[in-house]
């Protein structure tokens, strides 16, 4: 925290207090008058983390006698919020107004779908969602449409995608809109085209701090290096073992290569963990050391050894869900049985899984048994239809060029203006080189639209104009309430008995009022930007008494007393799509994801897998325990015996083979061939048994070898020996 200026890399392991390091570093710089608050830029990945960091810095400064600096002068926020702030100041230099819209996934897909239709690209050749993913990947790699083929080999599909990418960017500009990736890409264009803007920011930001550095993509790293400039005062904190977002462009090489890019950098390692018990940390380490591309480190703790990690073997996914429920109930029951009050609450439990599809059965069991739960990563509040419809009105009024939002609201509530009429408006706009909003204004000129429809369109235009004028005279909450009343939405939904949708609209009005109260002078633009940049974690109520369900990706940065990781089976976790073509880097990413899941647990960790699992459209499959279970040090594990549940008919299914993950080491005979045992093979080297089939002379074992990968071997002739 007190090192001199210059580049610094802090390798901060899970639960090692990296946020504390960052906040104390900022406070130290200000306290020692090394850098004024207004010359510090601090960047993280979630709004929640940014807010917590700001509050901690303010508390640290408040404890210093004579220190009255306010954190309001700090540039502290997410990459996207900082970049959006830059763009609001200079968007006109790039051909956008400062009121540009920020398109979310649904908006992007809607725009791309129309582009693909107009280009006559068959859905089976390239879907809108596929195009969105590919374009996002290109942008995160700082690849523009004009240099697309510098990075991708020309082919028919790539040529189509390059053209779609080019047209997509044109349409975004016409709509005065940017997507999430543009928020990172456009500032770099600003810096390239207007070096004086970059120089101004370099003078302003004399010291830059970055949280979760391992999650940065290429564009973000280029942005950081550009801002650091010649002074190179860049303080980054991260953990390569927790780099889990490669699918959205994150490059673990950024942290691995930081020392090469900044040879003069100082490296500090934070290896003391304040979160988990010693057994949980040792279990996490025994798996992550199998990754070859990592920086050396080993977490330790002064906490107690704690309980061993518990492995649950279930007959199928239904049984797995029931078993998880039973263990939650059991944890509550232990309080009175042992005469101790652990003070357990439902919020102490988290159930983590690899894919969202796994949550359904777990939800069913919890709901049926009266256990409250919350899902992180489900349908976000601001993605609900009635909420998005109202937000689309706000966006059109703030940015009339936003054709995607205009298309959404022109017939909401129903006005009798259908798709055919909207298409005619858009065609007229294109022929006249004007926006769709301007085409609405000039609807009387479009002969192909009937007089009755023209009147409806012009009435819609008058409605929008009215609220464009009112936004300058009413406060934000007053203006929004007037709009919703004028649209008569509540009354319509009452007639349709849509109480939940009514509550969602009222909740939106409350959110707008709260935003205005917290931000004096709040505008439509500022509220829309907040909504666009908000994440699921930002809305999570940590005080609510409910079990938390979420994917492992969503769990990063969180902690819970008791954690369940479900679905630890080959093909599900690790999830290696197209396994025959999977690269070592894919497996290492999955292993890092498992490491993140394990290190969320403070006191107790359950790992579960099913022997059979139904796959959509493919029937029921036999499952093999995940290789990650085999990589765990068996001395740290305990096999739980689970009972059959009464809720489902398992008559035709095998009992769980409770020997499969095996992990009661003290009761095992030295010569027993069983999963989890280490073996040596004359050709393949050292490996660990994943599963055992058969017995006697016909016994076969599946072994994951450290160098040769997974092999199935007949024990009698396999040249294996237990070690």
Image: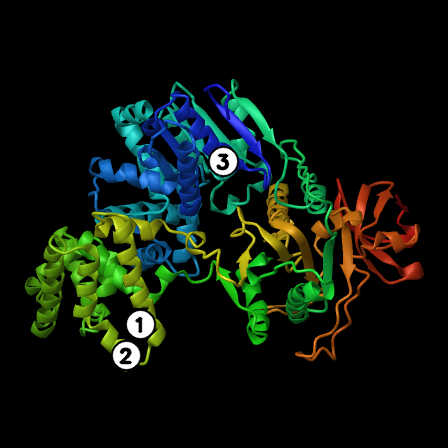
Comparing 504 with 466, the one in front is 504
* Residue neighbourhood size for the residue with mark 3, other residues' Cα within 10 Å, grouped as few (<14), some (14–19), many (≥20): many
Closer-to-camera residue (425/673): 673
Q: Say which label, 1 or 2, has the lower sequence index.
A: 2
What percent of the width, then of the height, locates residue 261?
A: 50, 23
Report the residue at 74% width, 45% height from top.
Answer: 305
- Horizontal and vertical percent for residue 565? 63, 57
State whether residue 150 appears in this view.
no
Q: Are marks 1 and 2 in contact (CB under 8 Å)?
A: yes
Q: CA distance from mark 1 to mark 3?
A: 42 Å
Tell me which label, 2 or 3, sits earlier in the chain: 3
Query: For mark 1, does the 10 Å Cα neighbourhood hold few (<14), some (14 to 19), or many (20 or more) residues?
Result: some
- From the image, tell me which residue sits under label 3: 213
Give SS at disc 2: helix
Q: Secondary structure at mark 1?
A: helix
Query: Which label belongs to residue 502?
Result: 1
Disc on the earlier residue, 1 or 3:
3
At x 59%, y 41%, the residue is 14
Residue at image coords 35%, 35%: 71
The answer, for residue 60, to whether it is visible in the render is yes
User: Disc 2 to disc 3, how far (Cα)?
Assistant: 49 Å
Q: Nearer the viewer, mark 1 or mark 3?
A: 1
Residue 494, disc: 2
């Amino acid at each position: 925290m007190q090192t001199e200026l210059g580049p610094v890399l802090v390798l901060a392991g899970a639960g090692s207090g990296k946020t504390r390091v960052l906040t104390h570093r900022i406070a130290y710089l200000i306290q020692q008058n090394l850098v004024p608050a207004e010359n510090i830029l601090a960047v993280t990945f979630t709004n929640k983390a940014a807010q917590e960091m700001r509050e901690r810095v303010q508390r640290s400064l408040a404890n210093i006698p004579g220190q009255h600096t306010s954190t309001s002068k700090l540039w502290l926020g997410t990459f996207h919020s900082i970049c959006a702030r830059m763009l609001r100041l200079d968007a006109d230099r790039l051909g956008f107004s400062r009121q540009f819209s920020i398109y979310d996934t649904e908006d992007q897909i809607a725009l791309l779908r129309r582009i693909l239709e107009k280009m006559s690209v068959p859905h089976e050749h390239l879907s809108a969602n596929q195009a969105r993913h590919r374009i996002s990947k290109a942008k995160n790699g700082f690849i523009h449409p004009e240099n697309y083929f510098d990075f991708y080999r020309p082919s028919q599909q790539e040529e189509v995608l390059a053209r779609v990418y080019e047209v997509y960017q044109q349409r975004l500009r016409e709509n005065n809109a940017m997507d999430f990736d543009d928020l990172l890409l456009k500032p770099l264009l600003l810096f390239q085209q207007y070096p004086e803007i970059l120089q101004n920011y370099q003078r302003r930001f004399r010291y830059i701090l970055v949280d979760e550095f391992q999650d940065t993509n290429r564009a973000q790293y280029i942005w950081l290096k550009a801002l650091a400039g010649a002074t190179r005062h860049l303080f980054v904190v991260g953990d390569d073992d927790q780099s889990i977002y490669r699918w959205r462009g994150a490059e673990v090489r950024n942290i691995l290569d930081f020392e090469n890019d900044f040879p003069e950098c100082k490296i500090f390692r934070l290896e003391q963990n304040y979160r988990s018990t010693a057994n949980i940390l040792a279990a996490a380490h025994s798996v992550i050391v199998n990754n070859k591309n990592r920086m050396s480190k080993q977490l330790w703790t002064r906490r107690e050894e704690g309980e061993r990690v518990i492995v649950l073997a279930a007959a199928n996914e239904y049984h797995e869900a029931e078993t998880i429920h039973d263990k939650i109930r059991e944890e509550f029951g232990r309080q009175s049985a042992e005469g101790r009050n652990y003070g357990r609450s439902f919020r102490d439990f988290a159930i983590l899984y690899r894919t969202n599809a796994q949550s359904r059965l777990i939800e069913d069991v919890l709901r049926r048994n009266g256990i409250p739960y919350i899902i992180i990563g489900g349908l976000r509040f601001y993605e609900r239809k009635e909420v998005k419809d109202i937000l689309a009105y706000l966006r059109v009024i703030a940015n009339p060029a936003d054709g995607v939002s205009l298309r959404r609201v022109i017939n909401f509530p129903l006005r009798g203006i259908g798709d055919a009429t909207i298409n005619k408006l858009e065609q007229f706009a294109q022929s006249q080189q004007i926006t769709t909003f301007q085409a609405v204004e000039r609807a009387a000129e479009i002969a192909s639209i009937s007089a009755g429809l023209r009147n409806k369109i012009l009435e819609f235009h008058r409605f929008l104009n009215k609220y464009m004028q009112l936004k300058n005279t009413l406060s934000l909450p007053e203006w929004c309430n007037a709009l919703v009343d004028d649209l008569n939405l509540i009354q319509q939904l009452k007639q349709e008995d849509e109480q939940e949708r009514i509550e969602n609209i009222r909740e939106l009005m409350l959110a707008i009022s709260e935003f205005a109260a917290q931000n004096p002078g709040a505008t439509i633009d500022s509220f829309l930007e907040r909504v666009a940049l908000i994440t699921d974690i930002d809305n999570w109520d940590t005080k609510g008494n409910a079990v938390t369900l979420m994917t492992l990706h969503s769990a990063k940065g969180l902690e819970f007393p008791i954690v369940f990781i479900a679905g630890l089976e080959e093909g599900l976790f690790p999830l290696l799509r197209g396994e025959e073509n999977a690269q070592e880097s894919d497996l290492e990413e999955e292993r890092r994801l498992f490491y993140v899941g394990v290190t969320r647990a403070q006191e107790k960790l359950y790992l579960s897998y099913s022997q059979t699992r139904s796959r959509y459209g493919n029937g029921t499959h036999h499952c093999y325990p995940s290789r990650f279970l085999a990589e765990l040090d068996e001395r740290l594990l305990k096999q739980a015996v689970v009972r059959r549940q009464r809720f489902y008919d398992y008559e035709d299914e095998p009992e769980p083979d409770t020997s499969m993950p095996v992990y009661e080491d003290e009761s095992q005979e030295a010569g027993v061939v069983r999963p989890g045992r280490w073996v040596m093979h004359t050709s393949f080297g050292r490996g660990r048994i994943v599963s055992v089939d058969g017995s006697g002379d016909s016994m076969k074992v599946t072994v994951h070898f450290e160098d040769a990968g997974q092999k199935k071997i007949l024990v009698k002739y396999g040249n294996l020996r237990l070690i």
